[in-house]
């Protein structure tokens, strides 16, 4: 009887021990599963927030740009940069672009129907009925014609003609007689260049007869700063005779031209051409 009691007690102890171990293993497994699930949840939350933050940050930048003050200088600058690469179709209006000028005060373009009808315009100015100047680029301007954008570019024909004459040399011209029979308006067109209120030079464009312009190998944007050593600032730009006197009375001319950042001497010997 005593043996049975001892055996029964040991059996109960064994059952209790096994049950305790079973519970401990179950709790351990359950704890491990909970830790893994919690870790996975934390990782998902962390990376999801990171992605959302990046998307929100990118969207926020776009939103700021979209709802930014439309009159801000940075947006104007970006718009001007875009215009450098976008050119509207060329206009069929009987207008000519004679020059573009940049100064600290403002930019303006010289536009007209012919050499005697040249005027300086700034963006927003009315050129003709329902035709406004929109923007100015280095080699063309954009005009608004009844609300539609069109381009007005420099006339390239005179430059092409000049290249052909220079290459072939088939036509020999008596420039001395030719010059004496023409006024300066017929040969060259001049647009005053003003910087900080001071005259610094004259932008040179071809006249109605472009042969002198071509012979000198001038290009759009060239600025004449002196003739035969006399600074342009010393000339009376309102009196063509002060410039024309050089073309009529001199056998040899020296033009000092500013082309971009460079200065170029152009010599024109009337008697040898």
Image: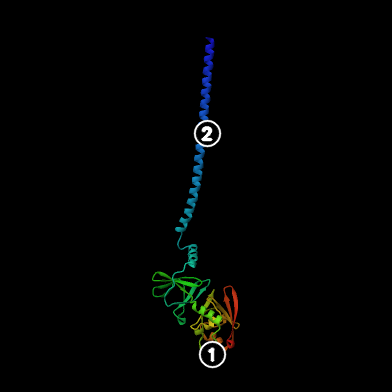
Q: Residue at x 48, y 51 (%)?
A: 55
Could you say which is closer to the camera, residue 173 or residue 114? Answer: 173
x and y, in percent, of residue 72 in the image: 48, 62
Closer to us: 250 or 40:
40
- Where in the figure is residue 194, as x and y percent of width and height? 53, 76
The correct choice, above or below, for 115 with respect to 144 in the image is below
Q: Is residue 191 visible?
A: no
Residue at far top of view: 1
Image quadrant where residue 133 sits: bottom left
Residue 220: numbered disc: none
Secondary structure at numbered mark 2: helix
Q: Which mark is residue 177?
A: 1
Pointers 1 and 2 in contact (C-beta within 8 Å): no
Where does the image place residue 259, in percent across and percent down from the top left? 57, 75
Colour scheme: rainbow
- Residue 178 visible in the shown view: yes
Kindly identify the residue that appears in the image at 54 percent across and 10 percent down.
2
Q: Looking at the rendering, which quadrant does residue 148 occupy?
A: bottom left
Where residue 96 appears, x then y in whole percent? Answer: 46, 77
Number of numbered labels in the structure image: 2
Q: Which residue is mark 2?
A: 32
Q: CA distance from mark 1 to mark 2?
A: 107 Å
Examine the rendered structure and indicate whether residue 58 appears above or below residue 164: above
142 lies above or below 179: above
Query: Quick one: 249 or 167, which is closer to the camera?
Result: 167
Give the answer, above or below, for where 125 lies relative to 213. above
Which picture quadrant has residue 215? bottom right
Question: Which element carries disc 1, helix, strand or loop?
Answer: helix
Q: How dense is the environment of label 1, judged by Cα within 10 Å: few (below 14), some, or many (20 and up)?
A: few
User: In the shown orientation, is residue 193 left or right of residue 67?
Assistant: right
Q: Is residue 230 left or right of residue 157?
A: right
Looking at marks 1 and 2 on the same chain, the residue that comes earlier in the sequence is marked by 2
């Amino acid at each position: 009887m005593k043996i049975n009691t001892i055996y029964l007690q040991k059996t109960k102890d064994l059952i209790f021990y096994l049950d305790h171990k079973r519970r401990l293993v179950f709790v351990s497994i359950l704890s491990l599963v909970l830790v893994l699930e919690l870790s996975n949840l934390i990782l998902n939350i962390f990376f999801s927030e990171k992605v959302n933050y990046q998307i929100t940050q990118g969207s926020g930048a776009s939103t700021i740009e979209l709802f930014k003050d439309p009159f801000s200088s940075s947006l104007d600058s970006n718009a001007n940069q875009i215009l450098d690469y976008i050119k509207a179709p060329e206009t069929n209006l009987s207008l000519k672009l004679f020059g573009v000028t940049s100064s600290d005060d403002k930019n303006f373009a010289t536009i007209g129907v012919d050499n005697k009808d040249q005027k300086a315009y700034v963006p927003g100015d009315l050129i003709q009925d329902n035709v406004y100047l929109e923007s100015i680029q280095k080699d063309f301007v954009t005009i608004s014609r009844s609300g539609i954008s069109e381009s007005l570019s420099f006339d390239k024909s005179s430059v092409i003609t000049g290249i052909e004459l220079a290459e072939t040399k088939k036509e020999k011209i008596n420039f001395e007689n030719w010059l004496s029979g023409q006024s300066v308006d017929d040969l060259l067109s001049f647009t005053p260049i003003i910087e900080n209120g001071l005259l610094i030079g004259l932008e040179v464009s071809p006249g109605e007869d472009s042969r002198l312009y071509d012979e000198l190998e001038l290009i759009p944007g060239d600025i004449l700063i002196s003739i035969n050593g006399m600074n342009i600032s010393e000339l009376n730009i309102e009196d063509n005779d002060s410039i024309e006197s050089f073309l009529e009375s001199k056998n040899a001319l020296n033009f000092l031209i500013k082309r971009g950042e460079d200065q170029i001497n152009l010599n024109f010997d009337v008697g040898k051409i």
